[in-house]
Image: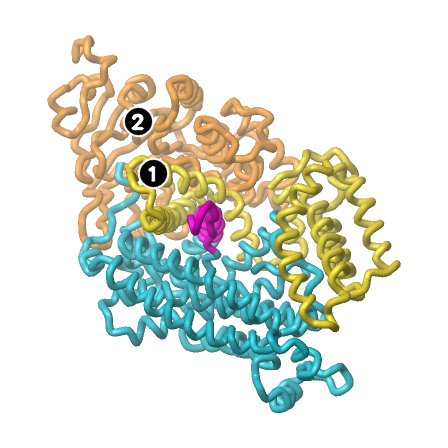
Chain colours: A orange, B yellow, C cyan
């Protein structure tokens, strides 16, 4: 009883909310953005600006790509979305998830709603077994016992790793580790998935499989990546960050075909678009 | 850290019971009188029985006992210098080996994560439990990193001098420490991202 | 120096386990009090680091190789309280999984290697670093190298004392054997400690304790990002024990020396027996803690070994001093420049 109440409070119904659908609080009407960022700025303690007045929004079923050269601030932005930065949240929230503001009091709720997948799965897989690791998040949310077993099993099934519960993390391949991390994030029932370089270090088959996996997941997605082909395949819109500023925002095809724009910001036109007319 | 997936009753036994039993056995054996006598049969029989029940291969057992003999004999030999302690030599060596056998059986039948659970139920402080868990999880990762750095260094080292080898090792470990500190921070962030407080 | 089971008798095992428990308890209290949540994972990672470091082969002579223990190194990098915890965990796993060191002897091993070695070595490190008139980073390397040697030798002496107290072997045999071996082994440990400290200083000076930072001050916010903030907030290095904590470990080590070493090393056994009695360690009815000179001095050669070892120890210390100085002076380049480098940027430069 107590577990259920606590789960409902955090907005997760463990039996359905693996993908953010069927949320107990409804998740807001269709028109509300899943994620809204308003004039977000951040300075390193040394004084350098890392983000300058970044604003954008993500609709509930949209997949957005975040591109930019190294040092543009992509990872810093992602850390903000989960409330990991800044150390002290401002009273005036810059970020809203499902219309919930990100302030000191709602940080736990936001962390559950925004599932962040880190660049190196090694840093995210902290437990001695796959089961323990996927269960880590739901346990914090109060899920336990048979319910937890079922949730972990379903999460692993979603990422194609059925039966991996007893495996040890350091014996998994890179792709498998990444999928376990994804399962661990999905198990918390997020409404927005934020991924930092999801295809890095994967071999071509791993990339294809992970891409198919991501394509199959409903809900809002934000992907920070250098993998332009991935962006072309999965994302309907892209944001281009450079030196902490949002320099361009628009539909994937038109932005990525704009060679001048891409080269100006340390990127390039992806090969799959080389033969495509910019307006076609 | 080797163990066999549970096939015997010992494997299936509760890790807490096994740990406490090991402690009792070791304590009892270690405190036996320093003279080989019939009283030694009791622990020897118990441990022999447990060893058989655990189905630990003989070769494995001997392989693990052998390196320990250097230390055991090395220290036990010191007792030969004192006429009062001298007669205790064979007893000490026997005792020591019996105790190691007890821990070998424990290790064989209990994978480390289970031992950690047992330690948790025995109320080991949480700081130490987390430390032990993270240590075992990340030891292979760090070992692999160290190996990679060694290989990279070796590919650019053209001298066989010991001094160079030591300097390289020092540099590798220094860098490994820095990278470890950074990794620890990233782990903290990843834990927080999933709700850890 | 891992003592297997079966060597220590009941009273010695009890005494050393008690001392170890006190030291670990002290360390736990300090760590809980001073460590922030963001620094907790570092304890586990540092333990993995020590283990990984212990697996590397340091070529010695011919085909042999030595291995680092790392107690003093850990204390230099993390401060004594964290080092005690880290080394205790390492020793626990070595005992339970690798059967290196006994279960009943774990208390003695923890006392010797986590407390005497790490904290004693750290104390010497801080003292030397403070008094040496050298450029700061060079002084750190020098102090680290000597402390590495010293900690090893000191731990071997308490270990010998524990063996003697257990009546397992006479002091006159145990002390020379253990001390002489470790006076030699300690050279490697000191050298490795100095070299690794040097490399860490070169890479990230703020991560080394005693430079006014320590890994606890150097962490905090994605590699370089939080450094400034933490450094202003931190004092002389977070978990690095000052005042009370320091005193605690020092007291424990002193007690250990009194109980395990003094009864044998001191030429006035009667006076020490009185001291031991007043501290409650000696029982009127139990056999005397201090063995009479008769049984041990039967072999005159052996009896003078203890004195010879003491002399060897002093010579070893002088050599270690000179060696550490040489290491710092000639091999450690001017590390001043490293301080002026701006702290590293974010690890997440994407």
Choose between B106 and C342: the one closer to the eye. B106
Tell me the CA gap for discs 1 and 2. 44 Å
What residue is drawn where x is 21% and y is 24%?
A250
Q: Position of residue B111 (x, y in %)?
A: 65, 42
Residue holding disc 1: B154
Task: Using the rendered image of the protein, determine whether residue A103 is visible from the camera's viewpoint.
Answer: no
Q: Position of residue B92 (x, y in %)?
A: 73, 61
The mark lying in front, picked from 1 and 2, is 1
- In which chain is the residue bearing label 2? A
- Residue C51 painted magenta: yes
Q: Quadrant of residue B36?
A: bottom right
> With respect to residue C331, does C311 lie above or below?
below
Q: Position of residue C54 (x, y in %)?
A: 48, 50
What residue is drawn where x is 42% and y is 21%?
A206
Task: Using the rendered image of the protein, determine whether residue A243 is visible from the camera's viewpoint.
Answer: yes
**Picture disc at residue A64:** 2
- In which chain is the residue bearing label 1? B
Q: Quadrant of residue C167?
A: bottom right
What residue is drawn where x is 42% and y is 40%?
A123
Q: Residues within 10 Å of mark 1 (few under 14, many from 20)?
A: few
Task: Name the image quarter holding the N terminus of chain A.
Answer: top right
Q: Position of residue A231 (x, y in %)?
A: 29, 22
Task: Name the image quarter holding the C terminus of chain A.
Answer: top left
Q: Residues within 10 Å of mark 2 (few under 14, many from 20)?
A: many
> With respect to residue A179, does A47 lie above or below?
below
Choose between C251 and B68: the one closer to the eye. B68
- Residue B162 painted magenta: no
Q: Which residues are magenta?
A: C44-68
């Amino acid at each position: 009883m107590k577990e259920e109440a606590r789960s409902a409070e955090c907005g997760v119904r463990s039996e359905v909310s693996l993908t953010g659908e069927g949320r107990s609080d409804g998740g807001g009407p269709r028109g509300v953005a899943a994620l809204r960022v308003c004039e977000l700025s951040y300075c390193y303690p040394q004084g350098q600006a890392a983000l300058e007045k970044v604003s954008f929004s993500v609709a509930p079923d949209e997949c957005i790509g975040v591109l930019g050269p190294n040092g543009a601030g992509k990872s810093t932005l992602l850390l903000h979305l989960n409330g990991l930065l800044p150390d002290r949240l401002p009273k005036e929230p810059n970020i809203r998830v499902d219309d919930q503001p990100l302030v000191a009091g709602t940080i736990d709720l936001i962390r559950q709603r925004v599932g962040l997948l880190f660049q190196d799965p090694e840093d995210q897989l902290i437990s001695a077994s796959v089961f323990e690791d996927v269960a880590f998040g739901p346990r914090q949310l109060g899920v336990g016992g048979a319910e937890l077993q079922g949730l972990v099993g379903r999460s692993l099934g979603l990422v194609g790793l059925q039966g991996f519960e007893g495996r040890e993390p350091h014996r998994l391949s890179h792709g498998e580790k990444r999928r376990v991390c994804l399962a661990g994030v999905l198990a918390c029932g997020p409404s927005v998935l934020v991924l930092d370089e999801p295809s890095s270090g994967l071999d071509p088959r791993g990339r294809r499989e992970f891409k198919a996996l991501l394509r199959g997941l409903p809900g809002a997605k934000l992907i920070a990546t250098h993998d332009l082909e991935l962006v072309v395949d999965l994302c309907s819109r892209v944001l281009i960050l450079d030196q902490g500023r949002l320099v361009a925002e628009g539909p994937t095809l038109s932005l990525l075909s704009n060679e001048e724009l891409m080269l100006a910001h340390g990127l390039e036109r992806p090969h799959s678009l080389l033969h495509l007319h910019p307006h076609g | 850290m080797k163990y066999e997936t549970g096939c015997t009753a010992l494997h299936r036994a509760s890790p807490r019971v096994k740990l406490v039993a090991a402690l009792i056995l070791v304590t009892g054996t270690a405190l036996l009188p320093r003279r080989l006598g019939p009283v030694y049969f009791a622990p020897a029989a118990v441990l022999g029985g447990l060893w058989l029940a655990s189905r630990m291969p003989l070769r494995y057992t001997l392989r693990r006992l052998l390196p320990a003999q250097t230390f055991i004999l090395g220290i036990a030999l010191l007792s030969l210098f004192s006429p009062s302690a001298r007669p205790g030599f064979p007893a000490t060596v026997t005792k020591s080996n019996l105790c190691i056998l007890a821990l070998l059986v424990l290790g064989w039948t209990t994978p480390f994560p289970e031992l950690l659970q047992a330690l948790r139920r025995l109320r080991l402080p949480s700081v130490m439990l987390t430390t032990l868990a993270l240590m075992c999880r990340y030891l292979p990762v760090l070992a692999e990193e160290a190996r990679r750095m060694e290989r990279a260094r070796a590919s650019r080292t053209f001298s066989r001098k010991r001094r160079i080898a030591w300097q390289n090792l020092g540099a590798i470990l220094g860098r490994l420490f820095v990278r470890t500190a950074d990794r620890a921070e990233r782990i903290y962030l990843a834990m927080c991202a999933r709700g850890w407080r | 120096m891992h003592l297997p089971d079966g060597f220590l008798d009941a009273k010695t095992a009890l005494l050393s386990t008690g001392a170890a428990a006190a030291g670990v308890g002290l360390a736990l209290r300090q760590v809980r009090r001073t460590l922030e949540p963001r620094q907790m994972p570092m304890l586990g990672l540092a333990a993995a680091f020590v283990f990984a470091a212990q697996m590397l082969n340091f070529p010695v002579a011919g085909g042999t190789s030595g291995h680092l223990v790392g107690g003093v190194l850990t204390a230099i990098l993390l401060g004594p309280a964290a080092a005690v915890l880290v080394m205790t965990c390492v020793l626990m796993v070595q005992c339970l999984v690798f059967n290196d060191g006994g279960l009943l002897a774990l208390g003695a091993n923890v006392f010797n290697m986590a407390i005497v070695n790490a904290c004693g070595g750290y104390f010497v490190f801080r003292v030397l670093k403070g008094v040496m008139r050298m450029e700061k980073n060079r002084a750190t390397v020098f102090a680290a190298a000597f402390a590495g040697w010293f900690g090893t030798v000191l731990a071997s002496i308490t270990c010998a004392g524990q063996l003697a107290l257990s009546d397992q072997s006479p002091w006159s045999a145990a002390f020379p054997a253990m001390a002489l071996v470790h006076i030699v082994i300690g050279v490697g440990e000191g050298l490795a400690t100095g070299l690794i400290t040097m490399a860490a200083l070169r890479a990230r000076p703020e991560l080394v304790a005693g430079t006014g930072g320590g890994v606890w001050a150097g962490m905090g916010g994605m590699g370089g990002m939080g450094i400034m903030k933490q450094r202003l907030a931190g004092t002389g290095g977070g978990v690095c024990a000052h005042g009370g904590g320091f005193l605690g470990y020092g007291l424990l080590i002193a007690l250990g020396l009194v109980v395990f070493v003094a009864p044998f090393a001191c030429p006035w056994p009667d006076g020490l027996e009185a001291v031991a009695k007043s501290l409650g360690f000696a029982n009127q009815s139990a056999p005397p803690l201090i063995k009479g000179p008769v049984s041990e001095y039967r072999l005159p050669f052996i009896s003078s070994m203890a004195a010879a070892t003491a002399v060897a120890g002093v010579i070893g210390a002088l050599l270690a001093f000179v060696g550490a100085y040489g290491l710092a002076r000639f091999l450690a380049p001017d590390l001043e420049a490293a301080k002026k480098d701006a702290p590293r940027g974010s690890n997440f430069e994407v």
